[in-house]
Amino acid sequence: MLDPTSPIPLYYQLKTILLDQILQGKWLVGEFLPSENELTKQYQVSRQTVRRALAELQREGRISTHKGKGSLVAQPKLEQDLLRFYSLARSFSKGPHRVSSRILHRDRTSAGPVVARHLRMQATAPVVIISRLRYLDGEPIMLETSYLPSSMCPDLEKESNLEALYDYLEVTYGIYIRRAEEFLQAVSPTPEEAYHLKLPQGIPVFLVERISYTPKDQAVEFRHSVIRGDRFRYKVELH
Amino acid sequence: MLDPTSPIPLYYQLKTILLDQILQGKWLVGEFLPSENELTKQYQVSRQTVRRALAELQREGRISTHKGKGSLVAQPKLEQDLLRFYSLARSFSKGPHRVSSRILHRDRTSAGPVVARHLRMQATAPVVIISRLRYLDGEPIMLETSYLPSSMCPDLEKESNLEALYDYLEVTYGIYIRRAEEFLQAVSPTPEEAYHLKLPQGIPVFLVERISYTPKDQAVEFRHSVIRGDRFRYKVELH
DNA sequence: GAGTGGTCTAGACCACATT
DNA sequence: ATGTGGTCTAGACCACTCG
Protein backbone atom coordinates (compact mmCIF):
# COMPACT_ATOMS: atom_id res chain seq x y z
CA MET A 1 0.00 0.00 0.00
CA LEU A 2 0.94 3.66 -0.01
CA ASP A 3 2.85 5.41 2.74
CA PRO A 4 1.58 8.98 3.31
CA THR A 5 4.49 9.70 5.66
CA SER A 6 7.12 8.94 3.01
CA PRO A 7 8.93 11.82 1.33
CA ILE A 8 8.16 10.11 -1.98
CA PRO A 9 4.99 11.65 -3.45
CA LEU A 10 1.88 9.49 -3.38
CA TYR A 11 1.38 9.69 -7.14
CA TYR A 12 4.90 8.39 -7.64
CA GLN A 13 4.42 5.55 -5.17
CA LEU A 14 1.22 4.58 -6.94
CA LYS A 15 2.82 4.80 -10.35
CA THR A 16 5.62 2.49 -9.20
CA ILE A 17 3.18 -0.03 -7.77
CA LEU A 18 1.07 -0.07 -10.93
CA LEU A 19 4.13 -0.39 -13.16
CA ASP A 20 5.41 -3.32 -11.12
CA GLN A 21 2.04 -5.02 -11.42
CA ILE A 22 2.04 -4.44 -15.17
CA LEU A 23 5.54 -5.89 -15.47
CA GLN A 24 4.54 -8.87 -13.38
CA GLY A 25 1.66 -9.54 -15.71
CA LYS A 26 -1.23 -8.78 -13.36
CA TRP A 27 -2.91 -7.33 -16.46
CA LEU A 28 -1.79 -8.53 -19.86
CA VAL A 29 -1.29 -6.32 -22.86
CA GLY A 30 -4.71 -5.04 -23.98
CA GLU A 31 -6.38 -5.71 -20.65
CA PHE A 32 -7.99 -2.91 -18.64
CA LEU A 33 -6.60 -1.57 -15.41
CA PRO A 34 -9.11 -0.79 -12.64
CA SER A 35 -10.96 2.46 -13.31
CA GLU A 36 -9.80 5.68 -11.70
CA ASN A 37 -12.68 5.51 -9.25
CA GLU A 38 -11.74 2.01 -8.18
CA LEU A 39 -8.12 3.02 -7.72
CA THR A 40 -9.11 5.98 -5.53
CA LYS A 41 -11.07 3.63 -3.27
CA GLN A 42 -8.43 0.93 -3.29
CA TYR A 43 -5.48 3.18 -2.44
CA GLN A 44 -7.39 5.84 -0.49
CA VAL A 45 -6.09 8.80 -2.47
CA SER A 46 -7.84 11.50 -4.44
CA ARG A 47 -8.72 11.09 -8.06
CA GLN A 48 -6.18 13.72 -9.11
CA THR A 49 -3.43 11.69 -7.51
CA VAL A 50 -4.56 8.57 -9.33
CA ARG A 51 -4.75 10.53 -12.56
CA ARG A 52 -1.27 11.88 -12.18
CA ALA A 53 0.12 8.36 -11.69
CA LEU A 54 -1.76 7.15 -14.76
CA ALA A 55 -0.67 10.20 -16.77
CA GLU A 56 2.98 9.36 -16.17
CA LEU A 57 2.45 5.75 -17.15
CA GLN A 58 0.73 6.95 -20.30
CA ARG A 59 3.52 9.37 -21.13
CA GLU A 60 6.02 6.55 -20.77
CA GLY A 61 3.99 4.39 -23.10
CA ARG A 62 3.04 1.71 -20.57
CA ILE A 63 -0.71 2.29 -20.79
CA SER A 64 -3.15 3.97 -23.13
CA THR A 65 -6.27 5.77 -21.94
CA HIS A 66 -9.58 5.99 -23.73
CA LYS A 67 -12.38 8.35 -22.86
CA GLY A 68 -15.51 6.58 -21.79
CA LYS A 69 -13.80 3.18 -21.77
CA GLY A 70 -10.79 2.98 -19.51
CA SER A 71 -7.04 2.54 -19.37
CA LEU A 72 -5.33 -0.50 -20.73
CA VAL A 73 -1.85 -1.96 -20.82
CA ALA A 74 0.08 -1.01 -23.96
CA GLN A 75 2.45 -3.10 -26.02
CA PRO A 76 5.90 -2.79 -24.45
CA LYS A 77 8.47 -1.06 -26.59
CA LEU A 78 11.57 -2.81 -25.34
CA GLU A 79 10.56 -6.05 -26.95
CA GLN A 80 10.94 -4.37 -30.27
CA ASP A 81 14.62 -5.20 -29.83
CA LEU A 82 15.33 -6.57 -33.25
CA LEU A 83 12.14 -5.01 -34.49
CA ARG A 84 13.61 -1.53 -34.30
CA PHE A 85 15.56 -2.46 -37.36
CA TYR A 86 13.43 -2.84 -40.40
CA SER A 87 14.55 -4.65 -43.45
CA LEU A 88 14.69 -2.32 -46.41
CA ALA A 89 14.50 -5.10 -48.93
CA ARG A 90 11.57 -6.78 -47.29
CA SER A 91 9.81 -3.80 -45.81
CA PHE A 92 6.86 -4.29 -48.08
CA SER A 93 6.61 -8.05 -47.91
CA LYS A 94 3.53 -9.03 -46.00
CA GLY A 95 4.36 -12.23 -44.16
CA PRO A 96 6.10 -12.30 -40.79
CA HIS A 97 9.86 -12.65 -40.75
CA ARG A 98 11.60 -15.75 -39.51
CA VAL A 99 14.00 -14.80 -36.74
CA SER A 100 16.65 -17.12 -35.36
CA SER A 101 19.96 -16.89 -33.59
CA ARG A 102 23.11 -18.89 -32.95
CA ILE A 103 25.32 -18.56 -29.91
CA LEU A 104 28.93 -18.03 -30.92
CA HIS A 105 30.45 -17.76 -27.51
CA ARG A 106 29.57 -17.92 -23.83
CA ASP A 107 31.95 -17.16 -21.00
CA ARG A 108 32.49 -15.72 -17.57
CA THR A 109 35.46 -13.41 -17.05
CA SER A 110 36.36 -10.16 -15.36
CA ALA A 111 34.65 -7.09 -16.73
CA GLY A 112 37.62 -5.02 -17.79
CA PRO A 113 37.63 -1.22 -17.77
CA VAL A 114 35.27 -0.46 -20.67
CA VAL A 115 32.45 -2.81 -19.74
CA ALA A 116 32.90 -1.97 -16.05
CA ARG A 117 32.39 1.72 -16.76
CA HIS A 118 29.17 1.12 -18.67
CA LEU A 119 27.81 -1.24 -16.04
CA ARG A 120 29.10 0.89 -13.16
CA MET A 121 30.96 -1.98 -11.52
CA GLN A 122 34.49 -2.96 -10.56
CA ALA A 123 36.75 -3.83 -13.49
CA THR A 124 37.85 -6.99 -11.68
CA ALA A 125 34.32 -8.21 -10.93
CA PRO A 126 33.05 -11.10 -13.06
CA VAL A 127 30.69 -10.67 -16.00
CA VAL A 128 28.89 -13.13 -18.21
CA ILE A 129 29.62 -12.68 -21.91
CA ILE A 130 27.24 -13.93 -24.56
CA SER A 131 27.92 -13.53 -28.26
CA ARG A 132 25.09 -14.22 -30.64
CA LEU A 133 24.71 -14.11 -34.38
CA ARG A 134 21.14 -13.26 -35.30
CA TYR A 135 19.44 -14.15 -38.53
CA LEU A 136 16.49 -12.79 -40.41
CA ASP A 137 14.99 -15.26 -42.84
CA GLY A 138 18.19 -17.28 -42.71
CA GLU A 139 20.46 -14.38 -43.51
CA PRO A 140 22.95 -13.14 -40.88
CA ILE A 141 22.21 -9.51 -40.07
CA MET A 142 23.29 -8.79 -36.53
CA LEU A 143 26.29 -9.69 -34.44
CA GLU A 144 25.56 -9.10 -30.80
CA THR A 145 27.66 -9.32 -27.66
CA SER A 146 26.07 -8.92 -24.22
CA TYR A 147 27.82 -8.34 -20.93
CA LEU A 148 25.96 -8.87 -17.66
CA PRO A 149 27.21 -8.70 -14.07
CA SER A 150 27.69 -12.28 -12.98
CA SER A 151 26.54 -11.36 -9.48
CA MET A 152 23.08 -10.56 -10.81
CA CYS A 153 22.66 -13.67 -12.92
CA PRO A 154 24.88 -16.52 -11.65
CA ASP A 155 25.31 -19.47 -14.01
CA LEU A 156 23.72 -17.59 -16.88
CA GLU A 157 26.68 -18.63 -19.02
CA LYS A 158 25.62 -22.25 -18.59
CA GLU A 159 22.22 -21.72 -20.13
CA SER A 160 22.06 -22.68 -23.77
CA ASN A 161 18.61 -21.43 -24.77
CA LEU A 162 18.95 -17.67 -24.78
CA GLU A 163 16.66 -16.76 -27.66
CA ALA A 164 14.68 -14.39 -25.46
CA LEU A 165 17.28 -13.07 -23.06
CA TYR A 166 15.06 -10.52 -21.34
CA ASP A 167 12.31 -13.02 -20.72
CA TYR A 168 14.88 -15.44 -19.31
CA LEU A 169 16.21 -12.78 -16.92
CA GLU A 170 12.68 -12.06 -15.73
CA VAL A 171 11.68 -15.65 -15.14
CA THR A 172 14.94 -16.97 -13.73
CA TYR A 173 16.40 -14.06 -11.78
CA GLY A 174 13.43 -11.75 -11.34
CA ILE A 175 15.30 -9.01 -13.20
CA TYR A 176 12.99 -6.55 -14.91
CA ILE A 177 14.30 -4.09 -17.43
CA ARG A 178 12.50 -0.80 -17.22
CA ARG A 179 14.47 1.37 -19.61
CA ALA A 180 17.49 1.37 -21.86
CA GLU A 181 19.77 3.78 -23.66
CA GLU A 182 21.05 3.12 -27.13
CA PHE A 183 23.96 4.83 -28.84
CA LEU A 184 24.35 4.45 -32.57
CA GLN A 185 27.35 5.01 -34.77
CA ALA A 186 27.95 4.41 -38.45
CA VAL A 187 31.29 2.68 -38.92
CA SER A 188 33.19 0.27 -41.13
CA PRO A 189 33.08 -3.30 -39.87
CA THR A 190 36.13 -5.13 -38.57
CA PRO A 191 37.27 -8.09 -40.71
CA GLU A 192 35.81 -10.50 -38.16
CA GLU A 193 32.46 -8.71 -38.19
CA ALA A 194 32.45 -8.62 -41.98
CA TYR A 195 33.15 -12.36 -42.02
CA HIS A 196 30.31 -13.29 -39.68
CA LEU A 197 27.84 -11.04 -41.46
CA LYS A 198 29.08 -12.16 -44.88
CA LEU A 199 29.53 -8.53 -45.81
CA PRO A 200 31.02 -7.44 -49.15
CA GLN A 201 33.84 -4.92 -48.97
CA GLY A 202 32.89 -1.32 -48.33
CA ILE A 203 29.49 -1.88 -46.74
CA PRO A 204 29.11 0.23 -43.58
CA VAL A 205 27.46 -1.08 -40.42
CA PHE A 206 25.58 0.32 -37.47
CA LEU A 207 27.40 -0.01 -34.20
CA VAL A 208 24.77 0.01 -31.48
CA GLU A 209 25.64 0.10 -27.81
CA ARG A 210 22.81 -0.50 -25.41
CA ILE A 211 22.73 -0.22 -21.65
CA SER A 212 19.67 -1.63 -19.91
CA TYR A 213 18.50 -0.61 -16.46
CA THR A 214 16.27 -2.03 -13.73
CA PRO A 215 13.47 -0.01 -12.13
CA LYS A 216 16.06 1.04 -9.52
CA ASP A 217 18.36 2.30 -12.28
CA GLN A 218 20.88 -0.45 -11.80
CA ALA A 219 22.70 -1.27 -15.04
CA VAL A 220 21.93 -4.88 -16.01
CA GLU A 221 23.36 -5.34 -19.46
CA PHE A 222 25.83 -3.73 -21.78
CA ARG A 223 25.20 -4.85 -25.32
CA HIS A 224 27.38 -4.24 -28.34
CA SER A 225 25.65 -4.91 -31.67
CA VAL A 226 26.80 -4.67 -35.25
CA ILE A 227 24.11 -4.50 -37.93
CA ARG A 228 24.37 -4.41 -41.66
CA GLY A 229 23.81 -0.75 -42.53
CA ASP A 230 22.70 -0.81 -46.13
CA ARG A 231 19.89 -3.32 -45.93
CA PHE A 232 18.31 -2.28 -42.66
CA ARG A 233 17.16 0.93 -41.20
CA TYR A 234 16.46 2.13 -37.71
CA LYS A 235 13.22 3.87 -36.93
CA VAL A 236 12.77 6.46 -34.18
CA GLU A 237 9.56 8.16 -33.17
CA LEU A 238 10.04 11.63 -31.74
CA HIS A 239 7.36 13.22 -29.59
CA MET B 1 -7.26 36.28 -23.32
CA LEU B 2 -8.76 32.86 -22.73
CA ASP B 3 -12.10 31.75 -24.09
CA PRO B 4 -13.97 29.55 -21.59
CA THR B 5 -16.60 28.70 -24.19
CA SER B 6 -14.06 27.25 -26.64
CA PRO B 7 -13.81 23.47 -26.97
CA ILE B 8 -10.05 23.88 -26.59
CA PRO B 9 -9.10 23.30 -22.94
CA LEU B 10 -8.08 26.36 -20.97
CA TYR B 11 -4.70 24.91 -20.04
CA TYR B 12 -3.96 24.37 -23.72
CA GLN B 13 -5.04 27.88 -24.67
CA LEU B 14 -2.82 29.26 -21.94
CA LYS B 15 0.10 27.08 -22.95
CA THR B 16 -0.22 28.31 -26.55
CA ILE B 17 -0.34 31.94 -25.45
CA LEU B 18 2.71 31.57 -23.24
CA LEU B 19 4.64 29.70 -25.93
CA ASP B 20 3.89 32.42 -28.46
CA GLN B 21 5.10 35.04 -26.04
CA ILE B 22 8.27 33.06 -25.40
CA LEU B 23 8.91 32.69 -29.13
CA GLN B 24 8.30 36.39 -29.65
CA GLY B 25 10.85 37.20 -27.00
CA LYS B 26 8.58 38.68 -24.35
CA TRP B 27 10.91 37.00 -21.89
CA LEU B 28 14.46 36.22 -22.96
CA VAL B 29 16.29 33.01 -22.14
CA GLY B 30 16.97 32.96 -18.41
CA GLU B 31 14.28 35.48 -17.55
CA PHE B 32 11.44 34.60 -15.23
CA LEU B 33 7.86 34.17 -16.32
CA PRO B 34 5.18 35.62 -14.04
CA SER B 35 4.62 33.46 -10.99
CA GLU B 36 1.80 30.95 -10.92
CA ASN B 37 -0.17 33.20 -8.64
CA GLU B 38 0.18 36.14 -10.98
CA LEU B 39 -0.89 34.02 -13.94
CA THR B 40 -3.99 32.81 -12.09
CA LYS B 41 -5.00 36.45 -11.48
CA GLN B 42 -4.07 37.61 -14.95
CA TYR B 43 -5.93 34.88 -16.83
CA GLN B 44 -8.65 34.23 -14.25
CA VAL B 45 -8.12 30.48 -14.05
CA SER B 46 -7.28 28.19 -11.19
CA ARG B 47 -3.74 27.48 -10.17
CA GLN B 48 -4.00 23.85 -11.34
CA THR B 49 -4.86 25.06 -14.81
CA VAL B 50 -1.86 27.37 -14.83
CA ARG B 51 0.32 24.57 -13.53
CA ARG B 52 -0.81 22.19 -16.24
CA ALA B 53 0.07 24.72 -18.94
CA LEU B 54 3.48 25.27 -17.37
CA ALA B 55 4.02 21.53 -16.95
CA GLU B 56 3.57 20.99 -20.67
CA LEU B 57 5.95 23.78 -21.51
CA GLN B 58 8.45 22.25 -19.13
CA ARG B 59 8.06 18.79 -20.62
CA GLU B 60 8.69 20.26 -24.06
CA GLY B 61 11.83 21.93 -22.81
CA ARG B 62 10.67 25.53 -23.27
CA ILE B 63 10.87 26.50 -19.59
CA SER B 64 12.49 25.19 -16.44
CA THR B 65 10.89 25.44 -13.01
CA HIS B 66 12.66 25.91 -9.70
CA LYS B 67 11.12 25.41 -6.31
CA GLY B 68 11.03 28.59 -4.29
CA LYS B 69 12.23 30.72 -7.17
CA GLY B 70 10.05 30.55 -10.23
CA SER B 71 9.84 29.42 -13.85
CA LEU B 72 12.22 30.73 -16.46
CA VAL B 73 12.67 30.45 -20.19
CA ALA B 74 15.03 27.62 -21.09
CA GLN B 75 17.80 27.58 -23.64
CA PRO B 76 16.32 26.31 -26.89
CA LYS B 77 17.46 22.84 -27.72
CA LEU B 78 19.04 23.75 -31.05
CA GLU B 79 15.77 22.56 -32.51
CA GLN B 80 16.56 19.22 -30.89
CA ASP B 81 18.10 18.25 -34.24
CA LEU B 82 21.71 18.48 -33.60
CA LEU B 83 21.23 17.59 -29.98
CA ARG B 84 20.29 14.03 -30.82
CA PHE B 85 23.75 13.66 -32.23
CA TYR B 86 26.48 13.86 -29.66
CA SER B 87 30.00 14.57 -30.52
CA LEU B 88 32.21 11.68 -29.54
CA ALA B 89 35.34 13.74 -29.48
CA ARG B 90 33.89 16.53 -27.41
CA SER B 91 31.40 14.64 -25.31
CA PHE B 92 33.29 15.41 -22.14
CA SER B 93 34.17 19.02 -22.81
CA LYS B 94 32.29 21.30 -20.49
CA GLY B 95 31.51 24.43 -22.42
CA PRO B 96 28.54 24.76 -24.74
CA HIS B 97 29.11 23.99 -28.38
CA ARG B 98 29.09 26.69 -30.99
CA VAL B 99 26.50 25.85 -33.60
CA SER B 100 26.19 27.59 -36.93
CA SER B 101 24.85 26.88 -40.38
CA ARG B 102 25.20 28.05 -43.95
CA ILE B 103 22.48 27.87 -46.57
CA LEU B 104 23.75 26.18 -49.70
CA HIS B 105 20.60 26.36 -51.74
CA ARG B 106 17.05 27.64 -51.61
CA ASP B 107 14.44 27.01 -54.24
CA ARG B 108 10.83 26.35 -55.09
CA THR B 109 10.05 23.56 -57.53
CA SER B 110 7.65 20.70 -58.00
CA ALA B 111 7.87 17.95 -55.44
CA GLY B 112 8.68 14.97 -57.63
CA PRO B 113 7.60 11.42 -56.83
CA VAL B 114 9.85 10.60 -53.86
CA VAL B 115 9.26 13.75 -51.84
CA ALA B 116 5.59 13.75 -52.78
CA ARG B 117 5.15 10.27 -51.37
CA HIS B 118 6.73 11.20 -48.06
CA LEU B 119 4.72 14.40 -47.74
CA ARG B 120 1.54 12.77 -49.06
CA MET B 121 1.02 15.38 -51.79
CA GLN B 122 0.84 15.63 -55.56
CA ALA B 123 4.14 15.14 -57.37
CA THR B 124 3.45 18.24 -59.44
CA ALA B 125 2.63 20.48 -56.47
CA PRO B 126 5.31 23.00 -55.45
CA VAL B 127 7.70 22.49 -52.55
CA VAL B 128 10.28 24.72 -50.94
CA ILE B 129 13.76 23.21 -50.88
CA ILE B 130 16.33 24.34 -48.36
CA SER B 131 19.83 22.89 -48.25
CA ARG B 132 21.95 23.71 -45.26
CA LEU B 133 25.43 22.80 -44.16
CA ARG B 134 25.62 22.75 -40.39
CA TYR B 135 28.71 23.26 -38.32
CA LEU B 136 29.71 22.35 -34.80
CA ASP B 137 32.52 24.48 -33.45
CA GLY B 138 33.37 25.50 -37.00
CA GLU B 139 33.61 21.97 -38.34
CA PRO B 140 31.09 20.80 -40.97
CA ILE B 141 29.20 17.82 -39.60
CA MET B 142 25.77 17.68 -41.16
CA LEU B 143 24.42 18.23 -44.66
CA GLU B 144 20.70 18.74 -44.53
CA THR B 145 18.03 19.17 -47.18
CA SER B 146 14.46 20.03 -46.22
CA TYR B 147 11.37 19.85 -48.40
CA LEU B 148 8.18 21.62 -47.34
CA PRO B 149 4.87 22.01 -49.16
CA SER B 150 4.91 25.52 -50.58
CA SER B 151 1.18 25.81 -49.95
CA MET B 152 1.78 25.63 -46.20
CA CYS B 153 4.62 28.15 -46.07
CA PRO B 154 4.48 30.54 -49.05
CA ASP B 155 7.60 32.59 -49.66
CA LEU B 156 9.61 30.55 -47.17
CA GLU B 157 12.30 30.25 -49.83
CA LYS B 158 12.78 34.02 -49.67
CA GLU B 159 13.65 34.00 -46.00
CA SER B 160 17.37 34.06 -45.38
CA ASN B 161 17.57 33.55 -41.61
CA LEU B 162 16.54 29.93 -41.13
CA GLU B 163 18.74 28.99 -38.21
CA ALA B 164 15.72 27.89 -36.19
CA LEU B 165 13.39 26.55 -38.86
CA TYR B 166 10.77 25.12 -36.54
CA ASP B 167 10.50 28.31 -34.52
CA TYR B 168 10.19 30.27 -37.76
CA LEU B 169 7.36 28.02 -38.93
CA GLU B 170 5.58 28.53 -35.63
CA VAL B 171 5.87 32.30 -35.55
CA THR B 172 5.31 33.02 -39.23
CA TYR B 173 2.85 30.39 -40.37
CA GLY B 174 1.42 29.11 -37.11
CA ILE B 175 2.65 25.63 -37.94
CA TYR B 176 3.33 23.53 -34.87
CA ILE B 177 5.20 20.28 -35.14
CA ARG B 178 3.91 17.72 -32.74
CA ARG B 179 5.78 14.58 -33.72
CA ALA B 180 8.27 13.26 -36.20
CA GLU B 181 9.58 9.97 -37.51
CA GLU B 182 13.22 9.38 -38.24
CA PHE B 183 14.74 6.61 -40.30
CA LEU B 184 18.44 5.96 -40.03
CA GLN B 185 20.76 4.10 -42.35
CA ALA B 186 24.51 3.63 -42.31
CA VAL B 187 25.88 4.24 -45.79
CA SER B 188 28.90 5.44 -47.70
CA PRO B 189 28.68 9.12 -48.64
CA THR B 190 28.36 10.30 -52.22
CA PRO B 191 31.36 12.24 -53.54
CA GLU B 192 29.43 15.50 -53.17
CA GLU B 193 28.51 14.73 -49.58
CA ALA B 194 32.09 13.75 -48.80
CA TYR B 195 33.25 17.03 -50.31
CA HIS B 196 30.94 19.22 -48.26
CA LEU B 197 31.65 17.37 -45.04
CA LYS B 198 35.38 17.25 -45.81
CA LEU B 199 35.33 13.51 -45.24
CA PRO B 200 38.38 11.32 -45.74
CA GLN B 201 37.91 8.24 -47.91
CA GLY B 202 36.16 5.29 -46.35
CA ILE B 203 34.34 7.11 -43.54
CA PRO B 204 30.68 6.01 -43.35
CA VAL B 205 27.83 8.43 -42.68
CA PHE B 206 24.40 8.33 -41.17
CA LEU B 207 21.63 8.94 -43.62
CA VAL B 208 18.68 10.26 -41.64
CA GLU B 209 15.29 10.82 -43.16
CA ARG B 210 12.82 12.71 -41.05
CA ILE B 211 9.15 13.40 -41.60
CA SER B 212 7.51 15.95 -39.32
CA TYR B 213 3.80 16.15 -38.61
CA THR B 214 1.36 18.72 -37.26
CA PRO B 215 -1.08 17.94 -34.44
CA LYS B 216 -3.53 16.97 -37.19
CA ASP B 217 -1.01 14.49 -38.60
CA GLN B 218 -0.38 16.51 -41.72
CA ALA B 219 3.15 16.03 -43.04
CA VAL B 220 4.99 19.35 -42.91
CA GLU B 221 8.57 18.56 -43.77
CA PHE B 222 10.63 15.83 -45.33
CA ARG B 223 14.25 16.18 -44.32
CA HIS B 224 17.24 14.31 -45.67
CA SER B 225 20.35 14.59 -43.53
CA VAL B 226 23.84 13.19 -43.86
CA ILE B 227 25.97 13.12 -40.74
CA ARG B 228 29.54 12.07 -40.22
CA GLY B 229 29.24 8.60 -38.70
CA ASP B 230 32.52 8.08 -36.93
CA ARG B 231 32.69 11.23 -34.87
CA PHE B 232 29.09 11.53 -33.78
CA ARG B 233 26.66 9.21 -32.25
CA TYR B 234 22.91 9.08 -32.04
CA LYS B 235 21.27 8.56 -28.68
CA VAL B 236 17.92 6.89 -28.18
CA GLU B 237 16.11 6.46 -24.89
CA LEU B 238 13.87 3.41 -24.76
CA HIS B 239 11.11 3.20 -22.19
C1' DG C 1 -28.65 5.86 -17.78
C1' DA C 2 -24.44 4.41 -15.72
C1' DG C 3 -19.63 4.39 -15.93
C1' DT C 4 -15.50 6.19 -17.92
C1' DG C 5 -11.72 9.46 -18.59
C1' DG C 6 -10.94 14.92 -19.42
C1' DT C 7 -11.16 19.33 -17.45
C1' DC C 8 -11.57 22.77 -13.81
C1' DT C 9 -12.07 24.94 -9.25
C1' DA C 10 -10.99 26.53 -4.39
C1' DG C 11 -8.49 25.63 -0.85
C1' DA C 12 -4.85 23.52 1.89
C1' DC C 13 -0.15 22.18 3.57
C1' DC C 14 4.66 21.51 2.45
C1' DA C 15 9.74 22.42 1.23
C1' DC C 16 12.56 25.64 -0.60
C1' DA C 17 14.75 30.30 -1.65
C1' DT C 18 15.14 35.04 -0.72
C1' DT C 19 14.85 39.14 2.08
C1' DA D 1 8.40 36.59 7.06
C1' DT D 2 7.12 36.24 2.43
C1' DG D 3 6.75 34.28 -1.98
C1' DT D 4 7.70 30.42 -4.81
C1' DG D 5 6.76 25.92 -6.92
C1' DG D 6 5.27 20.75 -5.42
C1' DT D 7 1.72 17.94 -3.69
C1' DC D 8 -2.92 16.67 -2.37
C1' DT D 9 -7.93 16.84 -1.50
C1' DA D 10 -13.10 17.02 -2.37
C1' DG D 11 -16.15 18.12 -5.38
C1' DA D 12 -18.04 19.49 -9.81
C1' DC D 13 -19.34 19.39 -14.79
C1' DC D 14 -18.38 17.64 -19.32
C1' DA D 15 -18.01 14.32 -23.45
C1' DC D 16 -17.68 9.88 -24.56
C1' DT D 17 -18.88 4.67 -24.67
C1' DC D 18 -21.83 1.04 -23.98
C1' DG D 19 -25.77 -1.53 -22.93
Image (spheres, coloured by chain):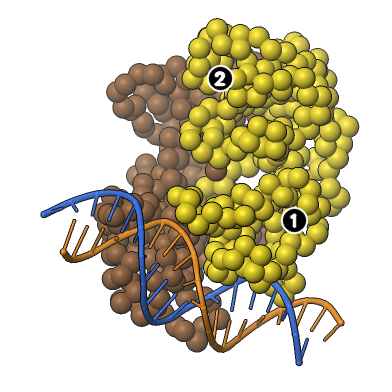
Chain colours: A brown, B yellow, C orange, D blue
Residue in the picture at 30% in, 76% down: A42
Front residue of A123 and A232: A232
Examine the rendered structure and indicate whether residue A183 appears above or below residue A35: above
Is A130 on the left or on the right of B186, as rendered?
left
Location of the C terminus of chain A (image quadrant): top right
What chain letter is assigned to the residue under label 1? B
Task: Name the element at disc 2.
Answer: loop
Residue in the picture at 80% in, 59% down: B31
- In the rendered structure, which amino acid carries the disc numbered 2? Asp
Examine the rendered structure and indicate whether residue A211 appears above or below residue A237: below
Task: Name the element at disc 1.
Answer: strand
Front residue of B161 and A145: B161
Q: How far apart, in angstroms, are the residues tagged by discs 2 and 1?
A: 42 Å
Query: Badge 2 is on which residue?
Result: A230
Q: How many marks?
A: 2
For the residue carrying disc 1, how many other residues have a C-alpha within 10 Å: few (<14), some (14-19), or many (20+)?
many
Residue A12 visible, this angle? yes
Q: Which mark is residue B73?
A: 1
- The answer to which quarter of the image holds residue B153 is top right
Question: In the image, residue B182 lies at what x, y percent?
Answer: 56, 31
Examine the rendered structure and indicate whether residue A74 appears above or below residue B82: below
Is D10 on the left or on the right of B168, as rendered?
left
Question: In the image, residue B175 lies at what x, y percent?
Answer: 61, 34
